[in-house]
Amino acid sequence: MFALIDCNNFFVSCERLFRPDLEGRPVVVLSSNDGCVVSRSNEARTLGIPMGAPAFKYRQVFKAQGVVQFSGNFELYGDISQRITHLLTAITPRTEVYSVDESFLDLSQLAIADYQTWGGAVRQRLLREVGIPVSIGLAGTKTLSKLASEHAKRDSGSSGVIDLINTTPATRAAYLLNTPVKDIWGVGRRLGPRLRAQGVHDALGLSRMPPRLAGQLMGVHGRQMVAELNGTPCHRLEPFGKVRQTIMHGRMFGEDTRQFPVIEAAIASLTARAAAHLRADHLLARSAAFYLRTNRHKPGYRLVSRHLDFTTPTADTGSLTGRLVEAAGAVFNPSLDYHKADILLYGLVSEHSLQTDLFNNLDLAESEASQTRLRAFDAINDRYGRRTIRYAAEDLSAAWQPQHRHRSPHYTTAWDDIPTARIIQ
DNA sequence: TCTGGGGTCCTAGGACCC
DNA sequence: TCTGGGGTCCTAGGACCC
């Protein structure tokens, strides 16, 4: 038995926590560079602003309709997300944080008399203790609980909770019939049209597809989807998450560039963040890559990447940056307008296993010196703030840095931004 | 003028090896 | 003129998820 807890319009709800005056008004949250709409309030949705819409195409609508815009404040959303996780983990440790705004709970160990009532109580508690509205879907498989939560979000009469566990087969079939294939977990922009071409238009139709045909059309994931829609679980709860295989950091630039020092500053900054992430997880990378690309929406789109291997796995910002910048310099073309840089770290190994297993032919002394150096580096930044100490290459240019014209305060993560409460008598 | 970031998994062609 | 089978690695791209 699964519950899916799905936060409603999560980023907008986080902004409204500290701006209750925005309740009932159209609000959107924009991605990095104020590029796309990544969260919208129901009022903004009613105005016809689609998810993922490029903001520049809707500036007129924003202005005419008084839509309130926010640049994404992802530190804030991450902090609110953790509060929700804490609360859910207190309900049951069998919790899987699936994304920043969704968690699966395994209910099979809990004594629940009535799932609908239980869901309503969880919903009220999150609203009261964190302030975020959620939709809850209850079902025997993850796919069905996702489907139920989607209906809980959309159907105003559902009071935010839909239970497909204690229900009749006819009711369950009605929910499946009212779910278009494109809204099923695992069906994207390519499988949707392919299924419709087969005459399958809704989840009920897909649940009745012969497994063999589902396998031919969609591979093993398709067979699993059909089974899950019929109540046979294929996906377990993963309480510890999957082992991370890559760490990636990338940014679109605030403006396109033909200057190598700008690229160098971007690579140095992205690598510094990725390497800090690596060290925080006590990992080392055997390999790294960079991707440099032009604007894919303009003619002549170009992407160039290079992969590098390290004889001694490393989390050293300096050596990673040095190798990546050198390799980028070798392929840099001054006649291209570069638009985005990404850094990928992969081949991840635990820093602990490195010291005990593999190491006879590797430079253990240098590796240990590097780790000691970086521990000091991280300790300084932990104590005095991020980027208190940093590599000079990061400051070669700020021209690559994304723009964010509508950033809200860091209400919960910066001392200077913490709101003041006044008691009005 | 202006179109996100962070993941996983799979495929396919070319270079190279035997 | 005629040209195998099996493998790896690299690069590029595309599918899906949030």
Image (tube, coloured by chain):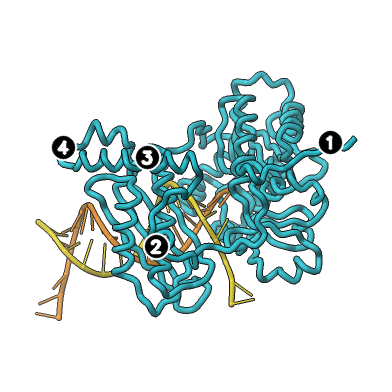
Chain colours: A cyan, B yellow, C orange
The chain letter for the residue carrying disc 1 is A
Mark 4 is on which residue type? Asn
Relative to A29, A343 lies left or right: left
Q: Earlier in the sequence, mark 2 or mark 3?
A: 2
Apparent side of residue A370 relative to residue A403 in the rendered image (left or right): left
Indicate the secondary structure of the residue bearing disc 3.
Answer: helix
- Residues beneath discs 4 and 1 located on the same chain: yes
**What's the chain of the residue with tag 3?**
A
Label 1 CA crowd tier, 10 Å (few <14, some 14–19, many 20+): few
How far is mark 4 from mark 3, CA to CA? 26 Å
For the point 29% across and 63% down, the residue is: A326
Residue named by callout 2: A291
The answer to which of marks 3 and 1 sits earlier in the sequence is 3
* Percent x, y of residue A370: 29, 43
Q: Are marks 4 and 1 in contact (CB under 8 Å)?
A: no
Residue A416 image point, x, y percent: 64, 45
Residue under label 3: A376
Position above or below: A8 against A333: above
Badge number at residue A423: 1
How busy is the neighbourhood of tag 4: few (under 14 within 10 Å), some, or many (20 plus)?
few
Tell me whether circle 4 and circle 3 mark residues in contact (CB < 8 Å): no
Judged from the image, the secondary structure of the residue bearing numbered disc 2 is strand
Query: The disc labelled 1 sits on which kind of residue?
Result: Ile
Label 2 environment density (alpha carbons within 10 Å; few <14, some 14–19, many ≥20): some
Query: Mark 4 or mark 2, which has the lower sequence index?
Result: 2
How would you rate the neighbour count of disc 3 (Cα within 10 Å): few for under 14, some for 14-19, many for 20 or more? few
Q: Residue at x 65, y 62 (%)?
A: A405
